[in-house]
Amino acid sequence: MSHNMLLVFEVTILVLAIFLGFEVISKVPAMLHTPLMSGTNAIHGVVVVGAMLVLGLGHKGPFMWIVGFLAVVLGSANVVGGFVVTDRMLEMFKKREPPKPKDE
Amino acid sequence: MGTNVSNLLYLITIVTFILALRYLSNPAHARRGNQIGAVGMLLAIVVTWVKTGGTSWWALALGMAIGGGFGAFAARRVKMTAMPQMVALFNGVGGGAATLIALAELHRLLPQPGKPTLDILIAIALSGLIGAISFTGSLIAFAKLQELIKGRPITYPGQKIVNLAVLAGCVGLGATLAAGVQDQWLLWAVVAGGALFGVMFVLPIGGADMPVVISLLNAFTGLAVAVGGFELENNVLIVSGMLVGASGTLLTLKMGAAMNRSIANVLFGAFGQVSEGAAAVAAGDGGTVRSASAEDVAVMLAYAHKVVFVPGYGLAVAQAQHDVRQLADLLEAKGVEVTYAIHPVAGRMPGHMNVLLAEANVPYTQLKEMDDANPEFSRTDVAVVVGANDVVNPDARNNQGSPIYGMPILNVDDAQAVVVLKRSMNPGFAGIENPLFYNPKTVMLFGDAKESITKLIQDVKTL
């Protein structure tokens, strides 16, 4: 694929992703807005993929080593932290706790 | 692994992310969605690992162990009350990673003559800039929420012009880079400028406006990652980044709407400043404040039919969510109907109060959003305001001079009686006077929210 074709294709999926994002997010209730924020936080942690490509593929100078390594560290913190925090939060949302003694 | 194969596998990751967001529409299965997303992320990481072909695998492993270890440790240790700053921090590191990728990509491409095409250069400049803004902006937000620096707006004359000039300078430098002056230092200057702008743009924003700022920074990081996807010609970065960008934008708009303020006003208005004049006016026709003892309030609550708790940031500060839940359980055991009314911007991030109450095992079926809660106040015997202020301020309805006029509020003054738990008569964070406190229906219960609730629990038990 030529570079320009690829670019047009990329812009297309970018624009579609905007609409998809609005569509999906508008169905999230206000109650879950904090997990939504941390969940999307975890998703943009996918930046670690880019960081890995930089560190793993680039021609190796000291600059690439340092920058790539730092990017991998930051990206991994983003991914792991994001998913763990979201999981902790969502675990707490319960419909009803196990039946409690009611004496009336 | 060929690019086609890896891109197809990345597509699976994209689908899991979309599913993760879809599952968030209902708290009953939201957690499973997050786990599906995590599996998808793992797939993307494995695919990328294979793509890099095992060269420098130990550097990858070490970097991931350090970053992942820190992330896991911080995420496990953080208290639910500190969640806003944690989200800000993870948001910032993502932006920082996007900036570093831009720097590395330019460094890699520059030596090859004619290689960075215009679109790649634009992408590099943009993701470097936006990522840097998000990185430092999030760190300042973190510092403010963690109270490492003052939460109050920090302002000086000519601030907006200076901010605008810095941003314009960055865009100009980025354009120069894209126009063909291919110098690594130009990108460094763009990144430095963006970092400076991030600091200066979040510093003047007060704590009460944090829900808007955090959502916006979330959108910024998503956008920086999406643009980074153009540099690396990587579909998973483009789509996932933009999903987050769209989500953050939508949340930002929703938070703005919940405050009845334009985003520009939140970002450049420095809320605390505007309000002082109006506060002085309102204080003049104050009237009297009735303060009550815990015993009195306990009686009111125990003999009510319906009690609504209205939590605010004060609940988080006092860490009183478990005590509130205990009190609610006691009341329910006495046959009182208990619900919680939650304003969309209560607290320091969107949905902050829901998370706190969920932590205290309050079933989410008892948590009412504003539109559902408001019609119920007229059938409510006692509304208990715990550490909330602006979101229950009737001036937002009645007083055109008030800085929060027009903001949708929880109409607690429709209830038969209102109990306000508050530390003292100091105006709230935004420094706005609240006539609710002078309403004849209202009684104040002064003191730390946690201590007051503990006393109420003891007194209700003895009844």
Image (cartoon, rainbow, N blue to C red):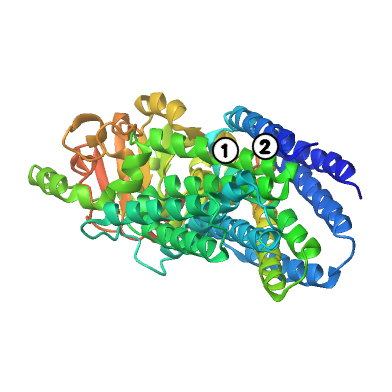
| Residue lying furthest bottom | A62
Around disc 2, counting alpha carbons within 10 Å, would you say few (fewer than 14), some (14 to 19), or many (20 or more)?
Answer: many
Q: Is residue B264 visible?
A: yes
Q: What residue sits 46% from the left and 39% below the top?
A: B252
Question: Disc 2 on helix, strand or loop?
Answer: helix
Residue pointed to by mark 1: B247
Please report whichever mark, 2 or 1, sits nearer to the chain's N-terminal start: 2
Going by the numbered disc 1, the residue's amino acid type is Ser
To which chain does the residue with label 1 belong? Answer: B
The verdict on a common chain for dots 2 and 1 is yes
Quadrant housing residue B345? top left
Question: Disc 1 on helix, strand or loop?
Answer: helix
How many numbered discs sit on the rendered protein? 2
State if disc 1 and disc 2 touch (CB < 8 Å).
yes
Q: What residue sits 69% from the left and 63% below the top?
A: B111
Q: What residue sits 38% from the left and 68% below the top?
A: B149
**Is B368 above or below relative to B194?**
above
Residue B305 or A93: which is nearer the viewer?
A93
To which chain does the residue with label 2 belong? Answer: B
What x and y, as percent, mark residue A55?
A: 75, 65
Q: Is residue B431 left or right of residue B137?
A: left
Going by the numbered disc 2, the residue's amino acid type is Leu
Residue B366 or A5: which is nearer the viewer?
A5
Residue pointed to by mark 2: B21
| Residue lying furthest right | B1
Q: What residue sits 60% from the left and 48% below the top?
A: B123
